[in-house]
Image: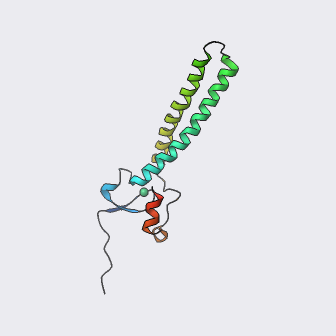
Amino acid sequence: MTAPEAPDPDETVCARCLEKYDRPDLDRLLWCEGCRAAARATAGRWGWVAGLVIAFLLSGWLWLVVQPTLLIEAWIGTVVASLWVGAKAAREVIYGVMRLRNAPAVEALPASQHPPEEERRVRFR
Ligand SMILES: [Zn+2]
């Protein structure tokens, strides 16, 4: 009969996925690399949605208010630039808000319900 395993003092739980990691593998907010990558990807997708909304609103304003007749290519370029810059800016804001809220990820499970190791590795790829 062996004594129950003592908790490893160097191990910490990721604030987002609730998995155990060595402390140096987590960042200042106790997020693991997989969670940071997943949050960046989510923020990137929502950033493009926000960029599209910004570009759509700008196009509407140009179409209805400015009504450009000259240099149409330059105005199209302005809309495309607003899409790209808006998506990047929104991505940073969304990622910042996710970091600020520091909430566990939707997919985080209590330790008793963790999937087997192989499934977890696939999930973070
Ligand atoms: Zn994590």
Above or below residue 41? Residue 72 is: above
Instruction: Point out residue 94 in the picture as x, y percentages from the top left corner.
Output: 51, 42
Instruction: Classify residue 59 by image quadrant.
Output: top right
Above or below residue 26? Residue 11 is: below
Residue lying farthest to the front in this orientation: 73
* Residue 50 shown left or right of residue 102 in the figure: right
Q: Indicate which quadrant contains ligand 1.
A: bottom left
Instruction: Classify residue 23 by image quadrant.
Output: bottom left
Instruction: Point out residue 15 in the picture as x, y percentages from the top left corner.
Output: 43, 57
**Residue occupying image coordinates x 47% and y 51%:** 38
**Residue occupying image coordinates x 56% and y 27%:** 80
**Residue occupying image coordinates x 49% and y 70%:** 113
Count of numbered circles in the view: 0
Image quadrant holding the N terminus, namely bottom left
Residue lying farthest to the bottom in this orientation: 1
Residue lying farthest to the top in this orientation: 70
- Residues 5 and 54: in front is 54
Instruction: Point out residue 118 in the picture as x, y percentages from the top left corner.
Output: 44, 66
Image quadrant holding the C terminus, namely bottom left
